[in-house]
């Protein structure tokens, strides 16, 4: 599977490590930058490149994007049709409640094709674990999830008149 990467300065160091890791997992990687640390870069520049490619081929491509929190990056990515970007900043534990693994749910239920990581909130090991689980988890294909994703696509078509 081909995995696209994109980040700004806040996620640059972690992206460099994850690119190597994802290659070691056996995936093809395409890096959309940042290619050097520049504290004045703007995340929409690199994120839009990866999101645009996923938008054009949402069933064949996935992207891992990074930023300080991952929030702004996901906002950019979700502007593109067919992109379902989710943010991960670390699994939350809620006392006395069973909390589902949000990485697994993002794939099984939402068929997320872009994972936005908050580099300032994750250790390298946390990020690697999240990426591995996300890449290994398949979309369930359950009717209720397909129905909901179809509704999202219909909203997008209406908004963008496509």
Image (cartoon, rainbow, N blue to C red):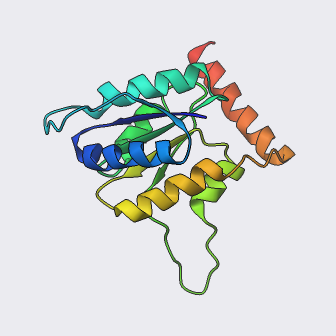
Q: Position of residue 143 (x, y in %)?
A: 86, 44
Placement of 92 over or under 62, stated as above or below: below
In front here: 3 or 41?
3
Image point 61% across, 22% down: which residue? 57
Residue 18 percent across, percent down from the top left: 40, 48
- Front residue of this view, candidates 51 and 159: 51
Q: Position of residue 130 (x, y in %)?
A: 51, 58
> Farthest top residue?
162
**Residue drawn 74% across and 41% down?**
148
- On the rendered structure, is 144 left or right of 123? right
**Quarter the N terminus occupies:** top right
Near-viewer residue (161 or 41): 41
Which residue shows up at 60% across the image and 65% down it?
101
Quarter of the figure with the C terminus: top right
Q: Residue 66: which quarter of the image?
A: top left
Q: Is residue 154 left or right of residue 50?
A: right
Residue occupying the point 51% across, 52% down: 131
Residue 7 position in % (x across, y down): 32, 38
Q: Residue furthest bottom?
A: 96
As drawn, is 95 to the left or to the right of 21? right
Q: In the figure, 117 relative to 48: above or below?
A: below
Q: In the picture shown, does residue 128 fall above or below 76?
A: below
């Amino acid at each position: 599977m081909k995995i696209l990467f994109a980040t700004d300065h806040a996620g640059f160091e972690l992206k460099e490590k994850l690119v190597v890791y994802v290659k070691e997992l056996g995936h093809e990687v395409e890096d959309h930058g940042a290619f050097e640390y520049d504290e004045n870069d703007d995340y929409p520049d690199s994120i839009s490149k990866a999101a645009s490619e996923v938008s054009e081929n949402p069933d064949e491509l996935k992207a891992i994007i990074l930023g300080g929190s991952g929030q702004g990056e996901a906002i950019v990515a979700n502007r593109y049709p067919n992109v379902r970007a989710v943010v991960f900043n670390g699994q939350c534990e809620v006392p006395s409640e069973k909390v589902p693994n949000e990485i697994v749910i993002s794939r099984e239920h939402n068929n997320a094709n872009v994972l936005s990581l908050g580099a300032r909130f994750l250790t390298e090991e946390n990020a690697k674990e999240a990426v591995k689980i996300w890449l290994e988890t398949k979309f369930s294909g359950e009717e209720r999830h397909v129905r909901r994703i179809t509704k999202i696509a219909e909203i997008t078509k209406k908004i963008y008149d496509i």
